[in-house]
Amino acid sequence: MKKCILSILLFTLIEGAFAQTDYATVQQGEFGITAGAAHYFGDLNTRAQLNRPKPAIGVFYRKQFNNYLALRVSAHYAQVGYSDIYSKNAYQQARNLSFNSDIVEFAVSGDFNFFKFVPGDPEFSFTPYATIGVGIFSYNPYAYLNGKKVFLRPLGTEGQNIGYLGADGKKRSPYGSTAICIPIGLGLKYSLNNNLTLSFQIAERLTTTDYLDDVSSTYVGIDKFPAVNGAPSVAGILQDRSFEKGSIIGAEGKQRGWSKQNDQYIIAEIGLSFNISSYRCPSVR
């Protein structure tokens, strides 16, 4: 009888001990690729139209700290561009400016899953998430003249090459080829199995430049771009293309862009990632 009671007590203690412990799978990390579309917002696309998307691709590594928090390192290549011909604004149509640019971006972001996410576990195979980070990107706006690509930064279309003094008394200097971006966005993740995860993310990039499109402040006047061998210079032509619409509007001091707000771009992408490894860690309930 004593042995029977002792056995029951021992079984109860062991069962209780195991009942207090839960083993949760935690993803260690994942490597993935993405493909999607990028779009620009700025002085040529003032109403945040989404009518001219361009391709974007990327790669990333996400380090998972637990089922909710992760740190992601990513690299993207994207194209952006826009033209005044797509605007319904009469002044922008008369201004007639356009640009394209290739973007190469490197960023570090923090991701937060709204739900517990465990790859391969049907109960925790889906979650929306939020992301915010900081990055650096390169850009080099260009336009086409007579079918030929012309890079705009070397031309100093707003008087940067001559140190032009604007109405605000500030000297205009050539802008750089890189800037900082702050990616902010939302996404969805779905675990296909233990190894593969499908995702969708859309993230806006706030930037520190207003020259992604080579347009920021005011015209400096055609006289600041001397003719070459009696013909208008390339810089003179591309700084004010309103003549192509029949009416020249680029008088010195007249608004060319809006310098109060920096340019932005957005990337929407679908991703496929491979779970590098997982582990089990005991947690007390």
Image (tube, rainbow, N blue to C red):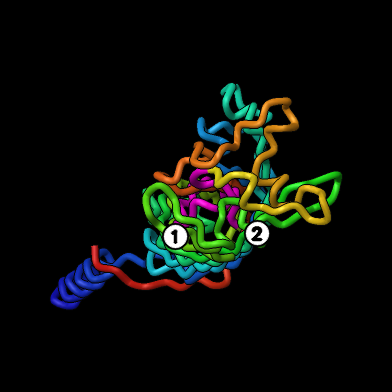
Give the left or right position of residue 185, taking residue 20 as reference: right
At mark 2, the secondary structure is loop
Give the left or right position of residue 50, taking residue 25 as reference: right
In x, y percent, where is residue 23? 37, 67
Extreme-right residue of the structure: 147
In x, y percent, where is residue 273? 61, 60
At mark 1, the secondary structure is loop
Decide: few, some or many residues near mark 2? Use Cα within 10 Å; few <14, some 14-19, many ≥20.
many
Relative to residue 36, is residue 162 depicted above or below?
below
Q: In the image, is residue 51 part of the stretch drawn in magenta?
A: no
Determine which quarter of the picture holds residue 159: bottom right
Tell me the kind of residue under disc 2: Asn
On the image, numbered disc 2 is attached to which residue? Answer: 140
Decide: few, some or many residues near mark 1? Use Cα within 10 Å; few <14, some 14-19, many ≥20.
few
**Of label 1 and label 2, which has the lower sequence position?**
2
In x, y percent, where is residue 218? 51, 43
Q: Residue at position x 61%, y 57% from top?
A: 156
Tell me the kind of residue under disc 1: Lys
Q: Residue at position x 83%, y 55% from top?
A: 229
Which dot marks residue 171?
1
Which dot marks residue 34?
none
Query: What segment carries the magenta color?
Result: 197-218
Q: Residue at position x 54%, y 72% from top?
A: 277
Determine which quarter of the picture holds residue 275: bottom right
In x, y percent, where is residue 142? 70, 52
Give the camera-side residue of 225 and 219: 225
Q: Residue at position x 50%, y 57% from top?
A: 164
Give the left or right position of residue 68, taking residue 174 as reference: left
Q: In the image, is residue 213 part of the stretch drawn in magenta?
A: yes
